[in-house]
Amino acid sequence: MTYQGCSSKGLCYAPIKKDFKFDNIKTGGSKTISSNSEVDTMQFLLQSQHVGLILLSFFIAGLLLSLTPCVLPMIPILSSIIFASHKRPSHQTRLKDFFLSLSYVGGVSFTYTLLGVFAGLSGNLVTTSIQSPTLMAVMGIVFILLALSMFDLYALKLPHSIEHFIATSILRVEGGKYLNVFIIGSISSLVLSPCIAPPLAGAIIYISQSRDFILGGLALFTLSIGMSIPLLLIGIFSDQWLPKRGHWMIIVKELIGFMLIAMGLFIMSPLFPENMDQIAYSALLLALSIYLFFANHRFKYKTMSWVHLSAFVTLIASILLFGLTLQRINVSYSENLSNTTRPNHVSVLPFKQIQSLDDLSRELNQRDNKMIMLDFYADWCVSCKEYEKLTFTNPKIKEHLSEYNLLQVDVTQNNAQHKALLKHFNLYGPPAILFFDKQHNEVRTFRIVGYKNASQMLDHLRTLQHENQ
């Protein structure tokens, strides 16, 4: 270390150089260095204790997250609620729609805040429990059953005694329906959120370490409010994009049925075999196209000519999606012919599977002068699937990663060994990607939590390579 002392009068002393020796202490392969990864940035921000800056930063992060697929599945659900509320005439449509959206957003915010605080205080992988295969299958089936009721295949009604009780107690209170929407928002945000974003992960890490669940909870609350801005806009401007009441509402109700089926497929898609979800989506688009072609025969309106155009566009989309899926299947089949051994799930990269901290320790103790990439994966993780299909398939990324030892932890089963690995690295769920230098110390500044597309990942790898030459 070189340093130089100066007096307040401008006099400076000669530079002094001193050598300091530090023991290279390795704890699970992690460098004890100051980090500036996305998760650590949020964690450091919380530790700064500047409440106003914290809340503003998390609100902005929520706005950015609202542009990601994490929020999109909630939009059809809220739209269907607003459509249903328009069945009865009202002179305060915009105001009531806004309060419906506000109730829904309140449920979303309540869930994110409660989930984050509970996860931080318990230290458990709560998202893994919530998005377990069994619960995902049950919720997906529930959405599909709800969709069938929109096609009048059956009447979705409560028993008469319960219906009478609700009618005489809860529904007579004007706020009762808003409470129902609040509950729907809570449940949908709990199940449909497909990823653990860096701001959320950073807040959870801070809560678990500092036990300051009040500040952490407020940060998560403002994050969820920022994420929900598109949902509030739907409530404010719904009267401008909703047509007047009429027979068209039958078509709208059945279109909502198609959306609910799509949501059910989306929830269960991580459970499907590879490419089966794309085939299911293309079949749904084909069914929607056929439905739209025949819809105009039921309603003889000239203004319904847009239905035929929509049917044609939907048909083209179905054909294109099915064709691309078949092409992907052919490519996967060709690659499979050259591989005799395969992991539990299909991966485009030659990952070596590890199951425990002991497995990881053996890999880190090998002196092969190669960097290591450790990927945390789960079958129920939607963003992990995006990495497999959209990021790791990039030829330039494959070329960069060919110089790495590639390790992967499949935490689908979330057993004790998986929990130990996640806890060791202070992670709360996949996707997460860790990098280790040639001495097999983690380069924590390049830790990834959440999804990066091919371009972002390529820039990440190039910067990592430049700093570790």
Image (tube, rainbow, N blue to C red):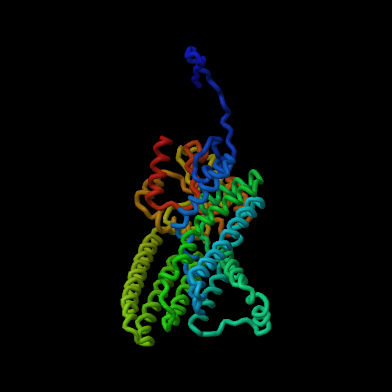
| Placement of 266 over or under 296, stated as above or below | above
| Residue 468 position in % (x across, y down) | 43, 36
Rendered-image quadrant of the C terminus: top left
| Residue 400 position in % (x across, y down) | 38, 45
**Residue 110 seen in the current view:** yes
| Placement of 365 over or under 85, stated as above or below | above
- Which of 394 and 171 lies nearest the eye of the viewer? 171
| Placement of 296 over or under 73, stated as above or below | below
Which residue is located at x 41 percent, y 59 percent? 389
Which residue is located at x 59 percent, y 51 percent? 218
| Residue 316 position in % (x across, y down) | 32, 73
Q: Residue furthest front?
A: 91
- Which of 245 and 305 lies nearest the eye of the viewer? 245
| Placement of 386 over or under 420, stated as above or below | below
**Residue 279 seen in the current view:** no
Q: How many numbered markers are drawn? A: 0
- Which of 134 and 103 lies nearest the eye of the viewer? 103
Which residue is located at x 36 percent, y 62 percent? 331
| Residue 467 position in % (x across, y down) | 42, 36
